[in-house]
Image: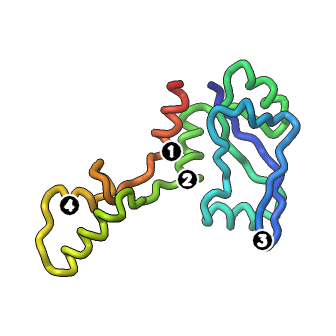
Amino acid sequence: MKLIKMSIGRNRTPEKTSYVYPKEYDARKVRFGPVYESSLKKNFDKVVARGDRDESILIGVDDADAVQFLANPTAQEVPYDDALALGDDWTEQVERITDSAKVIAISAKVARGESLSKKEKEALDPESKEPGITKSRSFKEVLDEALAK
């Protein structure tokens, strides 16, 4: 798989943002992404402040399809480490509640001043694999999985 950074057009209204993809872009051939430069608020503000009407995306395509995408003058193949740096800047891990009933029950115990078991404490620890509160996968985990396919 080739990792490619390329520019896409961005149309912004107060209600929404829409994108215009270059003719070389074929969504059916994208195997990873797209990951948008403006996916986080901090980056969206930077993109808007630049004043231009485009932004970058990171995608992964099969080696055989890369020639088509790289024909776009804004497209460039990026090495793995550069893709990781972009992904780390453009995405973030978030905490998610994976078992709301368990989290509510544990919260009730805390509110009553009751002690928590080791398993209950793990359920509140996003770094733990115990269902309750967990973290989304890192960009590296998602990218590595896509590259392994």
Q: Which residue is mark 2?
A: 91
Could you say which disc has been placed on residue 15 in the image? 3
Q: Earlier in the sequence, mark 2 or mark 4?
A: 2
Tag 4 or tag 3, which sits nearer the N-term? 3
Which residue is at a point 81% across and 26% down the rendered structure image? 68
| Mark 3 or 1, nearer chain start | 3
Q: Residues within 10 Å of mark 4 (few under 14, many from 20)?
A: some
- Tag 4's secondary structure? helix
Q: Classify residue 25 by image quadrant.
A: top right
Q: Position of residue 99 (x, y in %)?
A: 35, 59
Which SS class for mark 2?
loop
Mark closest to the chain's N terminus, 3 or 2: 3
Element under disc 3: loop
Labels 3 & 4 near each other (Cβ < 8 A): no
Check disc 1 and report the residue beneath it.
139
- Residue that badge 4 annotates: 120
Q: Secondary structure at mark 1?
A: helix
The amino acid marked with disc number 3 is: Glu
Q: Nearer the viewer, residue 94 or 5?
A: 94
N-term-proximal mark, 1 vs 4: 4
Q: CA distance from mark 1 to mark 4?
A: 28 Å
Could you tell me which residue is drawn at 79 percent across and 73 percent down? Answer: 14
